[in-house]
Image (tube, rainbow, N blue to C red):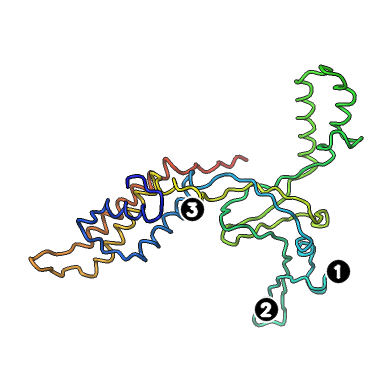
Amino acid sequence: MAQPGTRQELIDYCLRKLGAPVLEINVAEEQIQDLLDDALQIFYERHFDGVQQTYLKYRVTDDDVKRGEARPPGASGKDQTGITTSTAETTIVGTDVTFTYHENSNYLQIPPSVIGITRIFQYDESRSASFSNLFSFKYQLFLNDIYYFGGTDLLTYSMSMSYLETINFLLNTHKQIRFNQRSDRLYLDVDWTQLKKDDFLIIDCWRTVDPADYARVYNDSFLKPYLTAIIKRQWGQNLMKFQGVKLPGGVELNGRQIYDDGEKDIERIMEKMFNTYELPPLDMIG
């Protein structure tokens, strides 16, 4: 099938590109499955179509608040009996000095499909509750200027709201976060006493496009030739141990040539990835 929609259809497509069933491709099924997983990982981490921007909503639990407020043993503050903290101890060799480091469990467990997090949205309830907070700027604006239809022009309203956003940006800093996709942990460097049970956190993140839900991933114009190339390289690597062995009729397997051809194909495809499919890095201006 020229447009594969499943894992097996993609594998069969790549094997046909290498000569099957006319030629016997000397690569085990287990090796092909591993190579497909490797190709999908490259697709997720480098291809702009491998991820999509997603907003995840998380409800804060009482355990989250307790973990965030947890203090290391011996620290001052309210008792946190039963809260587990992560500690690390290091001793300097040759002296009697011991340094002990404590780290709070101020993180949220993130699904493995999330490979990057941009920010966490913060909301100012005093500005969002336009008709319930008497001290809200928006409430006062609507009360005095937009009481009747057409009381103010859109330009004035837009400039006022932009000015208010600028003040909010300068006085209320964004939540500081730390995230590494290999640990699947989102660290929140915030005042956890301000978080309450059943509060919601909106996480702006990038999540992988799961082929189980989006079958068109298997028909991607990068994934098909890339998987074919790495299968060819594995084929050559498997045959290199038979270098110099002649088959009946004087035929000699040239595993080195197949391996080199696969390497060249991979270099060409990855160069196209860098120039065509990968998003350029953001320049730092300062």
Does dot 1 land on a helix, a strand or a loop? Answer: loop
Q: Nearer the viewer, residue 131 or 251?
A: 131
Under mark 3, the amino acid is Ala
x and y percentages locating residue 148 in the rendered image: 86, 19
Find the distance from the CA under tag 1 to the CA under tag 3.
50 Å
Instruction: Place residue 142 in its image quadrant.
Output: top right
Q: Is residue 226 left or right of residue 73?
A: left
Find the distance from the CA under tag 2 to the CA under tag 1.
24 Å
Which label is found at residue 212?
3
Q: Are marks 2 and 1 in contact (CB under 8 Å)?
A: no
Under mark 2, the amino acid is Thr
- Select label 2 or label 1 by which is in front: 1
- Select label 1 or label 3 by which is in front: 3
183 in relation to 281, above or below: below
x and y percentages locating residue 89 in the rendered image: 69, 75
Q: Is residue 56 left or right of residue 131?
A: left
- Residue for point 73% across, 61% down: 106
Which label is found at residue 91?
2
Callout 1 environment at 10 Å: few (<14), some (14 to 19), or many (20+)?
Answer: few
Instruction: Place residue 111 in its image quadrant.
Output: bottom right
Callout 2 environment at 10 Å: few (<14), some (14 to 19), or many (20+)?
Answer: few
Under mark 1, the amino acid is Ser
Find the distance from the CA under tag 3 to the CA under tag 2.
49 Å
Q: Earlier in the sequence, mark 1 or mark 3?
A: 1
x and y percentages locating residue 127 in the rendered image: 82, 37
Q: Is residue 282 left or right of residue 105?
A: left
Residue corresponding to mark 1: 76
Does dot 3 land on a helix, a strand or a loop? Answer: loop
- Residue for point 75% across, 25% down: 158
